[in-house]
Amino acid sequence: MSNTYLYLLIALLAGAMMPTQAGTNNKMAAVVGSPILAAFISFFVGTAALFAFALLSGESLSAMTEAKNAPPVAWIGGLLGAFFVTAAVTLVPRLGVAMTFSLIIAGQMIVTLVIDHFGLFGVPVKEISLIRIGGILLITAGVVLIRKF
């Protein structure tokens, strides 16, 4: 299997994990009575798992000292992740998994167009086109269909 196919498979699996994570975090929120605490527990478990994986894979933890040289924008990733997990835990019982993730995907697509168009965060510029806007409109139509039925 070429690397491209492996990367496509990993992306597909990562996408499958998002609604699964929302469902499991929703279960935790029901047990602890709080979406914020459920998100905290999720991040705690994830942090412990990443720490164990880093140790087992031989990552040099001393490289973490270089984080002090990161630009301020590089530090907000954890905040964005915390918002995402907390929002998903809060929304799934109210909107359902399909509606929640349809809207999340629509939001992702809109922001990806902006990030690509302006080359934000150092990504290569890929200008907005009618075809790409058409893709967003199709995703939006999907959200409407999921909501209606």
Image (cartoon, grey):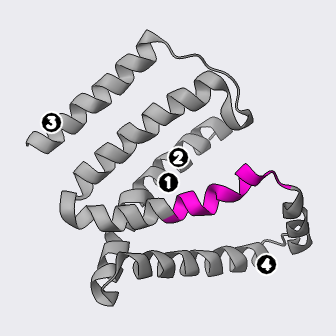
Discs 3/4, front: 3
Mark 4 and mark 1 lie on one chain; the one further toward the N terminus is 1
User: Badge 4, how many Cα within 10 Å: few under 14, some, many 20+?
Assistant: few
| Disc 2: which residue | 11
Discs 1/3, front: 3
In the image, residue 27 lies at what x, y percent? 30, 79
**CB atoms at circles 3 and 2 under 8 Å apart?**
no
Q: Main secondary structure of the magenta part?
A: helix
Q: Which residues are magenta?
A: 70-82
Quarter holding residue 21: bottom left
Mark 4 and mark 2 lie on one chain; the one further toward the N terminus is 2
Q: CA distance from mark 4 to mark 2?
A: 24 Å
| Disc 3: which residue | 145
Instruction: Say above or below: 143 vs 56.
Output: above
Query: Which residue is depicted at the point 59% across and 22% down?
Result: 117
Q: CA distance from mark 3 to mark 4?
A: 46 Å
The kind of residue tagged 1 is Ala
Which quadrant is home to the C terminus? top left
Instruction: Say above or below: 72 vs 131.
Output: below
Mark 3 element type: helix
Task: Say whether residue 74 is magenta.
Answer: yes
| Disc 4: which residue | 55
Mark 3 and mark 2 lie on one chain; the one further toward the N terminus is 2
**CB atoms at circles 1 and 2 under 8 Å apart?**
yes
Q: CA distance from mark 4 to mark 1?
A: 22 Å
- Residue 52 shows up from this direction: yes
In the image, residue 40 lies at what x, y percent? 50, 79
Between 2 and 79, the one nearer to me in the picture? 79
In the image, residue 55 lies at what x, y percent? 79, 78
User: Badge 2, how many Cα within 10 Å: few under 14, some, many 20+?
Assistant: few
